[in-house]
Image (cartoon, rainbow, N blue to C red):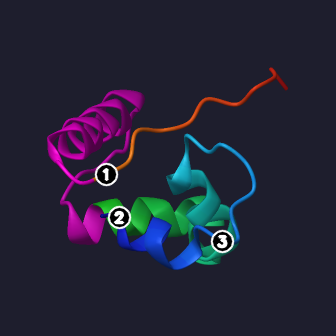
Amino acid sequence: MNTFYEHHHDSIRFGYRCVDRILLNGLIQPFQQPERVVGFFNTYREQYPVSKAVLRDIATQYEHWVKAQPDLPPPRRPGRAR
């Protein structure tokens, strides 16, 4: 099962689809600064410049990885549109 979900399921009172945004906005403040994001991709992924295509490819890879995990609960869709 998803460790994040296991640990926080009692605290989650909404349907979420973008846990990456929750983590980025809540825990990883340096990624709010564009120059640090560029530095991260340059240092750890050896990708410069960072383009929409690079980010789209990473998102696609992550989506395929999530779908390949057998123990993850399916995402719940919100009841109402925002």
Would you place residue 52 above or below residue 44 in this image? Answer: above
- Residue found at x 32% / y 60%: 41
- Viewer-side residue, 53 vs 76: 76
Secondary structure under badge 3? Answer: loop
- Residue found at x 26% / y 71%: 43
State the separation of the CA atoms marked 1 and 3. 16 Å
Amino acid carrying label 3: it is Asp
**Picture quadrant where residue 45 is located:** bottom left
Q: Is label 2 in contact with label 1 (beta carbons under 8 Å)?
A: yes
Q: Is label 3 in contact with label 2 (beta carbons under 8 Å)?
A: no
State which tag comes first along the sequence, 1 or 3: 3
Amino acid carrying label 2: it is Asn
**Picture quadrant where residue 76 is located:** top right
State which tag comes first along the sequence, 2 or 1: 2
State the separation of the CA atoms marked 3 and 2. 14 Å
To which residue does mark 1 refer? Answer: 72
State which tag comes first along the sequence, 3 or 2: 2
The C terminus: image quadrant: top right
To which residue does mark 2 refer? Answer: 2
State the separation of the CA atoms marked 2 and 1. 6 Å
Secondary structure under badge 1? Answer: loop
Q: Which residues are magenta?
A: 42-71
Q: Nearer the viewer, mark 3 or mark 2?
A: 3
For mark 3, does the 10 Å Cα neighbourhood hold few (<14), some (14 to 19), or many (20 or more) residues? few
